[in-house]
Image: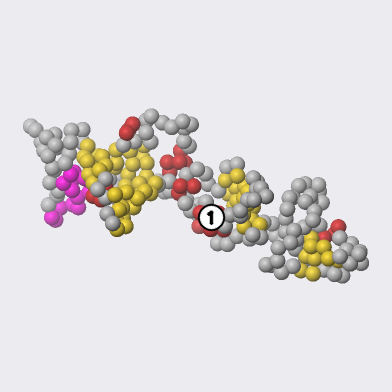
Amino acid sequence: MIDAASEGRAVPAEKSGATAARTPAERGAVVRPGGLAVVRLRDLRPGDVRLAQEGEQSVTLAIESIGAGMYRWTSLVLRPSRHGYHPPLPPLYWQFPFTVTVSGRALVDVDAERHVDPASLPPIPYPAEQDIPAAFTVGDVVTKGRITWERHPDGWYNQHRGPSTEPISDASIAELFRNPDTLRLGIPEYTPAAPAAPAATGPGALTLADDTVHLCPWHRGLDGSWMGAHRAEVVLCDPTGVLVPVCHEHAPLVTCP
């Protein structure tokens, strides 16, 4: 017996009152030999499985009209291309969804008889909200792979900072924890700033205002380790009466009169 699917004719959707149609075939898509169907992107529904070259399969998570015939389409790769990538991409790369903006008229190949419930998929490994700071402060450190950013009074800099490097904003650093396109390349690690040392006391000790930017003149810690440029936290008078901005760690090096 030759059925409608083998002839490439449309398979009618289930009648009213039956179980809701889920697969493209149940919704009336033309089924071609091999179980393939070609549908317009605007006709995709969550759970549809797209078929691409070299055996790649991805499931539609969401599709949203954004006007002017364009759609925002989010999908998760179930099986990467058999051809592979050079160098091979880590498993984490495929655990985050891809979102693209595409014309609703674009044609895509789908598995006509298959539906994957998005709720049945493993959870996407986004960082837990409690692990993402609500606000950053000077001295915070964020590391991702081989890159380390440190929060300075005027913004974030990494270890490749040069004389003309522009600071990175808090919003850009926060995106490292939320944007799937950056998370698929590695989960960042957040290290909060060390607790502030007790304020220096003594004659001439003045506390700097939080919005005042001064740098401590010493770039090495008292243990000899390299600290680099860092913020001064108090102002002390040296024996000659000159005011010296200094951090708490180096405050003992300034002898007040």
Q: In this view, does 8 lie to the left or right of 210?
A: left
Q: Is residue 8 above or below residue 205?
A: above
Q: In this view, does 196 lie to the left or right of 58?
A: right
Q: Which colour scheme is used?
A: secondary structure
Q: What secondary structure predominates along the stretch shown in magenta?
A: loop
Q: What residue type is labelled 1?
A: Ser
Residue 173 location in percent, x, y? Answer: 55, 54
Query: In the image, what residue occupies the spot 70% across and 66% down?
Result: 212
Element under disc 1 = helix
Query: In the image, what residue occupies the spot 76% across and 47% down?
Result: 226
Query: In the image, what residue occupies the spot 36% across and 37% down?
Result: 79
Read off the residue under disc 1: 172
Q: In which quarter of the image is residue 4?
A: top left
Nearer the observer, 212 or 7: 212
Q: Is residue 223 above or below residue 68?
A: above
Q: In which quadrant is the C terminus drawn?
A: bottom right
Question: What are the residue bounds of the magenta stretch?
Answer: 16-29
Q: Is residue 141 visible?
A: no
Residue 91 location in percent, x, y? Answer: 46, 38
Q: Is residue 247 left or right of residue 8?
A: right
Q: Is residue 242 visible?
A: yes
